[in-house]
Amino acid sequence: MIKVESVPCVGPCNRGRVEGEAREAGDPVWCRSCQRRIRVALTKIDELCTWVEGQADGFAGRTGGDGRGGGARRGGSPDLSPAIDLVDQVYGELRLIELDWRMIQGLSGSGRHGFGRTAYDRALVINFLQQHLASIMRHRKMIKPLGRILSYQVILQHMTHSEPARRDRPGRCPRCHNVNVLHTEDDDLIHCRFCPNVITEEEYDLEVVDRPDSAAVTESRRILGLDSE
Ligand SMILES: [Zn+2]
Ligand SMILES: [Zn+2]
């Protein structure tokens, strides 16, 4: 077999690495952890956009506003206009990613739908991207758009979350096997402080909590003072 030199992952796992430090390898473009980040980001974007629209509709209904956050200002409720604008911007970006991918793959254009502006249209776009994500993540031309998905998730999250989700999580990192290194970040994913590993809640339950390593979980719960939970 020909030995292929591994190309570093283009994702956030390699951010801030200094010269000479080992870099996470791409698989083939993004590493497994970063692929997970993107997958979750897309789902979160969908949830956050739906939440923002739901809030805006609620405020509009109560105050007779125009549904774009204008009513919210009059009612003394949080101003949602920046979030609504961002939802529009994110949707536009997702549409472009779908169109780019259709072009690269030679898929027929917008025959499926005309890219309307409803929540349903956005769901179609997100559904398309989710279905093609595995191949999109293998394509180097799609690096920048996927990077923007990651940033949009963080921006939307900051705009809609009043409380940061950050907290330490007990258990052993399934990858570097260190204890007391896992913590939840603003993206609602569980990150390792020691290695670039990023896991979802489901993976945490499966690979950390349900793993026959209860001694490590108990020990780190004790150190973190989570015994009373
Ligand atoms: Zn990575
Ligand atoms: Zn780790």
Image: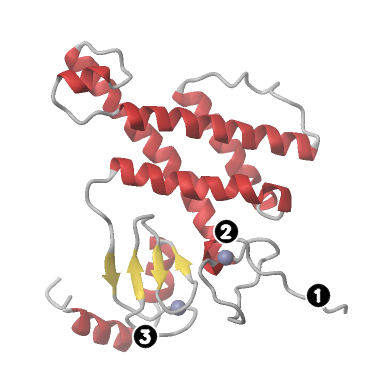
Q: Looking at the picture, how far across and down is residue 96, in whole percent?
A: 63, 32
Q: Nearer the viewer, mark 2 or mark 3?
A: 2
**Count of number-bearing discs:** 3
> Can residue 203 be spotted in the picture?
yes
The amino acid marked with disc number 3 is: Asp
Q: Is residue 70 above or below residue 159?
A: above
Which quadrant does the N terminus fall into?
A: bottom right
Q: Disc 1 marks which residue?
A: 4
Quadrant in which the C terminus is drawn = bottom left
Between 180 and 88, the one nearer to me in the picture:
88
Q: Residue at x 77, y 28 (%)?
A: 108
Look at the numbered disc 2 and say if its residue's Cβ is closer than 8 Å to ligand 1: yes
Considering only vertical position in the picture, is 203 above or below 160?
below
> How far apart are the two marked residues, 1 and 2, measured between alpha carbons?
21 Å
Q: Nearer the viewer, residue 16 or 101?
A: 16
- Sequence-wise first label, 1 or 3: 1
Mark 1: give few (<14), some (14-19) or many (20+) Cα within 10 Å: few
Question: Measuring 33% from the left and 69% from the top, which residue is drawn there?
Answer: 183
Residue 170: give x, y in percent of width and height.
Answer: 29, 76
Cβ–Cβ under 8 Å for marks 1 and 3: no
Q: How is the image coloured?
A: secondary structure
In space, the residues marked 2 and 3 are separated at their CA atoms by 27 Å
Query: In which quarter of the view is residue 25 placed?
Result: bottom right
Q: Residue at x 62, y 61 (%)?
A: 10
What crowding class fits label 3: few (fewer than 14 Cα within 10 Å), some (14-19), or many (20 or more)?
few
